[in-house]
Image (cartoon, rainbow, N blue to C red):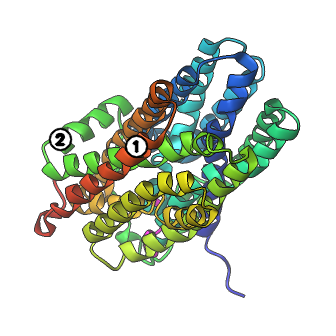
Amino acid sequence: MKRIHYSWIILVITFFSIIVAGIVISSSGVFINAFENEFGWERSVIALAFAVSLFLYGISGPFMAALLEVIGVKKMMLVSMATLITGSTLTLVMNQSWHLIIIWGFIIGLGASLFLTVVSPYVSTHWFGKRRGLALGILSASTATGQLILLPVLAAIIDKYSWRWAIALIIVLCFIMLIIIFLFMKNTPKDAGILPYGIEDEEQVSKEEQKGNPIVLAFKGLFAAVKVKEFWLLAGSFYICGLSTSGLIGTHFVSYCISFGIPLVTAASFLSFMGIFNLVGTTLSGWLSDRFDNRWLLFWYYSLRGASLVLLPYSLMEGSFILLAIFTVFYGLDWIATIPPTIGITRQIFGINKSGIIYGWIFAFHQAGAATAAYGGGLIYKFFDSYTWTFFLAGVFCVIASLFVIIIKKPTLQPVN
């Protein structure tokens, strides 16, 4: 019987670590009404805390990428998971709105940063020589799958018992992953006594390593990137990607459905089904990114996502569960299918060794967009008592993103020194 290559074990550990981190971040969507009802806090204040979290874990991405090169992935994963446990535990004793901003905005935001930004490209690049696109697609899918898959369970616990019991479940899951990471995670294939999957000659493994001050490395990567037009096109499109996914759907979809009379558990179930279809769509996107022009993949992803977001308000106003189900499938397949081709283009432009940190900066724009939608959606609801314009505008922005990526010229996709 052929032995399983340890790279696939690392993939599985990373996959479930990302899922758990995603559960922590995404649970904000089902806690909004619970926090509003128990503490009497305004929705815009609660949304601000979640917006800070989304922005902070995004802006931390390039620094996390630099730290990975200096400290190693195992220690970074252990510290990050422990930070998530700390933040989740402190949530149980909070009683002021500023507590929520500190705990969710800063502690949980930092704890989630590594898992939801740069660990996927790091693992796929360092542990895989072949099937790199597939590995990245699987790990990218776990980012949103974790954010969605357990939401009905959390919603049911909140509905029947209390939001504190839902937090307790999150703490248990984080603790289980902390133990698994400690026992089985490795920093590099060399630590496991093997070569990356698909590599048979050690000379094929890149020897270039970035050592030094993580802050210096992160800003050095940024200064190299800002000189390149394609960086701004990718960053702009990814800003809109974040605005139209985790910031909008992840934070406000459940509340939007509730405003039309859809029960909490039902709304969370629709969001969960998006996670299931996302797993299929993003894994397939990773496979496609190895075979087709990544620019055209992004063009169609953003265009189709924009169309689905325009459909959502219409389906809710019509009260059509069929249209809502169609949106769930359609949007779920496209949730973060943009990640593999975006990373693929980043690698082509900046090279494998520099792409981790530079992608971290591109992802920072993604989370700036997410934070904009999370807080902006709360403000629009406060003034208009509706989310409709928020979702419609997000659809229009997605069309703009499709134009950003398609004007990236293929002949320019060469490694930058």
Q: x%, y% of residue 368? A: 38, 35
Residue that extends furthest to the bottom in the rendered view of this protein: 1
Q: x%, y% of residue 190? A: 52, 60
Going by the numbered disc 2, the residue's amino acid type is Val
- Few, some or many C-alpha atoms within 10 Å of disc 2 (few <14, some 14-19, many ≥20)? few
Looking at the image, which residue is at 50% across and 67% down?
A: 330
Quickly name the residue at label 2: 226
Quickly name the residue at label 1: 243
- Which-is-in-front pick, marks 1 and 2? 1
- In the rendered image of this protein, does residue 410 appear above or below residue 94? below
Q: Is residue 191 visible?
A: yes
Whether residue 129 is in magenta: the answer is yes
Drawn side of residue 13 relative to residue 285, left or right: right
Residue that extends furthest to the right in the rendered view of this protein: 161
Q: Which residues are magenta?
A: 126-133
Q: Quadrant of residue 289?
A: bottom left
Q: Is 99 in front, or is 214? A: 99
Q: x%, y% of residue 281? A: 50, 69
Whether residue 362 is in magenta: the answer is no
Q: Is 144 in front, or is 64? A: 144
Q: x%, y% of residue 101? A: 57, 19
Q: CA distance from mark 1 to mark 2?
A: 22 Å
Looking at the image, which residue is at 35% across and 29% down?
A: 215
Q: Is 361 in front, or is 128? A: 361
Residue 392 disc label: none
Q: Quadrant of residue 309?
A: bottom left
Q: Secondary structure at mark 1?
A: helix
- In the rendered image of this protein, does residue 311 appear above or below residue 357? below
Q: Is residue 150 visible?
A: no
Going by the numbered disc 1, the residue's amino acid type is Leu
Q: Secondary structure at mark 2?
A: loop
